[in-house]
């Protein structure tokens, strides 16, 4: 059995997009292999042939303004602001349940990126993050797998399903988490639906064109990779055709300008991330070091990872998305990669088209294993 707790009540019915949704809070359960609580959002009219959705959540940094780890965890659990239109489609239109993990992040500590730290050792770079208790994050990929399995057990008690795997979703950094987790535990995943990845999707390759691809960009340093299970996954990646948000960007000089108030500003994208200048042909301007290699602008990927992915698949995120899409298709994977009008935010103006494409793709691919079409 499982223990249900909630902030206020044991179980709460909330209204979301005109649907009644049960909100169930599950305590951290180290004995079952996960150190963080999670929320199950379950439609009252749960679909007969449902898939559980695991949402790669991106909570805010709640260290500032909190006095204890317990307070940080409580605020993280309450943060449901990253449920995007595609998640709402699964939850409120397809009547699929959604699992929302509550994994606190820090100033520099980004566990929801699910990066190289979980292969090569956890390292807090900012001492302000020490309050989070590093030991709780050890084996986080396995903890996520255990959350998924436990969530499925709970749902099967409520209403049995024939599906024993989850669909994992995410947007932006959450999309990368979904892509990364699929490399580590493909046996847990039925499909990946990930948007705003830019050109930084994980690929099941060790090297290409003389460059090594280590986790999370590839599998060269993974102690084990289950290719057979990975090939069973359906992948749907999407991004805006004007999206320049790029956590794998090579180094560039910041562009300064004077705004209408006479203030010195740095050129940024819609998320506030710095972006490079463009040349006379509209191409972004990046810098190479003395050896002709790229270095990382940001800290989520190492210099060697950024150099490999940019040398092989392109320095600009729009180019990389296309080239990585082609690579995944050449590997024979069940994958659809598509651009829609808009930037990192306005891409959701095309949400109806995105939802239709997701449903058609997953309905066709998942039909091969379930024997039924998606609703």
Image: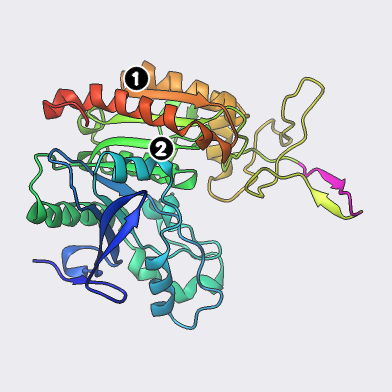
User: Measured along the vertical axis of the image, is residue 164 above or below residue 265?
Assistant: above
Toward which corner of the image does residue 166 lie, by quadrant?
Answer: top left
Residue shown at 38% from the left, 79% from the top: 70
User: Measured along the vertical axis of the image, is residue 218 above or below residue 208?
Assistant: below
User: Measured along the vertical axis of the image, is residue 172 above or below residue 363?
Assistant: below
Colouring rule applied to residues: rainbow
Q: Is residue 311 visible?
A: no
The one nearer the camera, 254 or 349, is: 349
Toward which corner of the image does residue 128 lie, by quadrant?
Answer: bottom right
Q: Is residue 84 left or right of residue 125?
A: left
Task: Where is residue 176? Give x, y as percent.
Answer: 44, 42
The one nearer the camera, 19 or 62, is: 19
Q: Quadrant of the C terminus?
A: top left
Task: Where is residue 201? Give x, y as percent.
Answer: 44, 34
Identify the element where label 1 is drawn: loop
Toward which corner of the image does residue 246 lie, by quadrant?
Answer: top right
Task: Where is residue 59? Give x, y as percent.
Answer: 46, 60
Query: Looking at the rendered structure, which numbered label has been put on residue 302?
Result: none
In the picture of the structure, the residue carrying the numbered disc 2 is: 194
Q: CA distance from mark 1 to mark 2?
A: 19 Å
Q: Residues within 10 Å of mark 2 (few under 14, many from 20)?
A: many
The one nearer the camera, 358 or 174, is: 358
Q: Quadrant of the N terminus?
A: bottom left
Residue shown at 14% from the left, 38% from the top: 49
Q: Over which residues does the magenta segment extend? A: 253-261
In the picture of the structure, the residue carrying the numbered disc 1 is: 331
Residue shown at 84% from the left, 46% from the top: 256
């Amino acid at each position: 059995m499982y223990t249900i707790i909630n902030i206020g009540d044991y179980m709460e019915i909330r209204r979301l997009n005109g649907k009644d949704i049960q909100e169930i809070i599950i305590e951290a359960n180290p004995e079952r292999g996960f150190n963080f609580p999670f929320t199950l959002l379950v439609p009252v009219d749960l679909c007969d042939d449902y898939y559980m959705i695991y949402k790669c959540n991106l909570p805010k940094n709640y260290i500032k303004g909190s006095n204890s780890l317990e307070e940080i965890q409580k605020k993280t659990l309450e943060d449901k602001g990253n449920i995007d239109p595609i998640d709402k489609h699964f939850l409120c239109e397809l009547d699929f349940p959604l699992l929302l993990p509550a994994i606190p992040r820090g100033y520099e500590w980004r566990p929801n990126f699910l990066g190289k730290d979980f292969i090569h050792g956890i390292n807090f770079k900012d001492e302000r993050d020490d309050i989070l208790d590093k030991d709780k994050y050890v084996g986080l990929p396995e903890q996520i797998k255990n959350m998924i399995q436990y969530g499925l057990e709970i749902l099967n008690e409520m209403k049995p399903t024939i599906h024993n795997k989850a669909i994992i979703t995410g947007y932006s950094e959450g999309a990368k988490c979904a892509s990364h987790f699929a490399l580590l535990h493909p046996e847990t995943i039925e499909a990946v639906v990930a948007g705003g990845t830019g050109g930084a999707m994980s690929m099941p390759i060790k090297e290409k064109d003389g460059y090594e691809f280590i986790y999370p960009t590839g599998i060269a340093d993974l102690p084990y990779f289950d290719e057979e299970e990975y090939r069973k996954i359906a992948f749907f990646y999407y991004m805006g055709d004007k999206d320049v948000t790029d956590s794998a960007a090579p180094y560039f000089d910041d562009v300064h300008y004077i705004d209408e108030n006479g203030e010195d500003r740095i050129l940024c994208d819609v998320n506030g991330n710095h972006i490079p200048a463009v040349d006379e042909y509209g191409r972004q301007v990046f810098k190479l070091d003395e050896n002709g290699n790229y270095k990382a602008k940001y800290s989520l990927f190492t210099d060697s990872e950024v150099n490999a992915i940019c040398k092989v698949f392109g320095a600009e995120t729009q180019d990389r998305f296309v080239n990585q899409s082609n690579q995944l298709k050449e590997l024979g994977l069940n994958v659809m990669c598509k651009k829609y009008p808009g930037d990192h935010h306005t891409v959701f103006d095309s949400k109806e088209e995105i939802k239709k494409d997701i449903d058609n793709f997953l309905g066709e691919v998942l039909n091969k294993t379930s024997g039924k079409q998606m609703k």
